[in-house]
Image (spheres, rainbow, N blue to C red):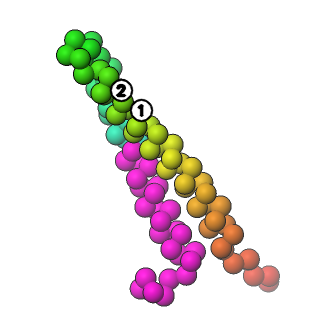
Amino acid sequence: MTADTKTPLEHVNDVLAQLKEMRHYAKNNVEALTTQWLLFDGELKKLKQAGPIEALMTRQSELHDALNEQIAALDELAATLRPPPEEA
């Protein structure tokens, strides 16, 4: 099926799938960065690099939260676009 022949629901589902994949990687990035932070917190402070790393962690967390919000909104939209179940 080409992009021209997709229904609005199919487009929303495609975007949802991509956002969920992005959320997965964002979560993994936050976890990996946090692990590194915990291992080297003292050294980063000595090197005056703690602040920039904290800022990156905060921004990555904000991205993860924004992805969750958008996924929830698109899930609701997809529910409204689904055709009603056919009666037997």
Whether residue 12 appears in magenta in the rendering, the answer is yes
Callout 1 secondary element: helix
* Residue 78 percent location from the top left of the image: 62, 67
Quarter of the C terminus within the rendering? bottom right
Q: Residue at x 30, y 28 (%)?
A: 53
The residue at 23%/17% (across/down) is: 48
Q: In whole angstroms, how far apart are the C-alphas of marks 1 and 2?
A: 6 Å
**Tag 1 residue:** 58
Location of residue 62 in the rendering, given as x and y in whole percent from the top left corner = 46, 39
Q: Which residues are magenta?
A: 1-26
Q: Residues within 10 Å of mark 1 (few under 14, many from 20)?
A: few
Q: Amino acid at mark 2?
A: Glu
Res 40 seen here: no
Q: In the orientation shown, which residue stands out farthest toward the right?
A: 87
Asked if the residue under mark 2 is in contact with the one under mark 1, i.e. CB atoms within 8 Å, the reply is yes
Above or below for 27 versus 77: above
Q: Residue furthest left?
A: 47
**Is 67 in front, or is 55?**
55
Between 27 and 66, the residue placed more toward the observer is 66
In the rendered structure, the answer to whether residue 81 lies left or right of residue 44 reads right
Prevailing secondary structure class for the magenta stretch in the rendered image: helix
Which residue is depicted at the point 64% across and 65% down? Answer: 77
The residue to which callout 2 is attached is: 54
Q: In this rendering, is residue 23 above or below 39?
A: below
* Magenta region includes residue 2: yes
Q: Determine the secondary structure under disc 2.
A: helix
Residue 48 visible (yes or no): yes
Q: Position of residue 31 (x, y in %)?
A: 37, 34
* Count of residue discs: 2
Identify the residue shown where x is 57% and y is 49%.
Answer: 69
